[in-house]
């Protein structure tokens, strides 16, 4: 909670949420123009996306600094990605 509060105080937090386990996933893909809907995750992996923070910062270095401060980085991996500008 302290990490989330720090993001809010810095004005960087734009959104966040926890995600339910991969077992609750439904996967959609299109093959040869036909939609396929599959129960469960697309691939079995040891790693799961548990949640996300959407932040707005000046540059990649600032994003990496926030990622390093995230408590999750002490127990797993924090992935940093830019979003597509629409």
Image (cartoon, grey):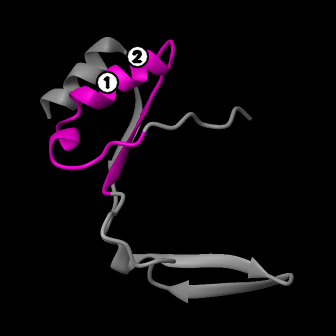
Picture coordinates of residue 6 (x, y %)? 22, 20
For label 2, the crowd category at 10 Å Cα-Cα, with few meaning under 14, some 14 to 19 and many 20 or more, is few
Viewer-nearest residue: 72 or 38? 72
Residue 11 location, quadrant: top left
Name above or below for residue 35 compared with residue 77: below
User: What is the secondary structure assignment of the residue under circle 1?
Assistant: helix
Corner quadrant of residue 79 = top left
Q: Which residue is located at x 70 percent, y 32 percent?
A: 85
Q: What stretch is highlighted in magenta?
A: 50-79
Is 22 displayed left or right of 74 in the figure?
right
Q: Give above or below for 16 relative to 51.
A: above
Residue wearing tag 1: 66
Determine if the magenta segment contains residue 57.
Answer: yes
Nearer to the camera, 79 or 8 = 79
Q: Residue at x 74, y 35 (%)?
A: 86
Circles 1, 2 touching at the beta carbon (< 8 Å): yes
Q: Which residue is drawn at 14% across and 35% down?
A: 1
Work out whether residue 79 or residue 20 is closer to the camera in this orientation and state it: 79
Between marks 1 and 2, how big is the CA–CA gap?
A: 6 Å
Residue at left 75%, top 78%?
30
Against 10, is 85 above or below? below
**Mark 1 surroundings within 10 Å by alpha-carbon count, few (fewer than 14), some (14 through 19), many (20 or more):** some
Image coordinates for residue 28, horizontal then vertical, percent: 63, 77
Q: In this view, does 74 lie to the left or right of 11?
A: left
Residue 17 place in picture, x, y as percent: 34, 48
Q: Where is residue 36 in the image (x, y as percent from the top left)?
A: 68, 86
Answer whether residue 7 is magenta in the image: no
Residue that numbered label 2 is attached to = 62
Q: Looking at this view, name the residue that lies furthest to the right.
A: 33
Helix, strand or loop at disc 2?
helix
């Amino acid at each position: 909670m302290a990490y989330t509060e720090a993001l809010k105080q810095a004005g960087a937090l734009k959104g966040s949420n926890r995600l339910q386990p991969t077992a609750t996933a439904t996967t959609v893909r299109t093959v040869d123009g036909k939609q396929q809907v599959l129960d469960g995750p697309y691939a079995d992996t040891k790693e799961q996306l548990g949640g996300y923070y959407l932040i707005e910062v000046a540059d990649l270095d600032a994003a990496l600094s926030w990622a390093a401060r995230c408590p999750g980085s002490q127990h797993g991996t924090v992935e940093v990605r830019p979003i597509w500008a629409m």
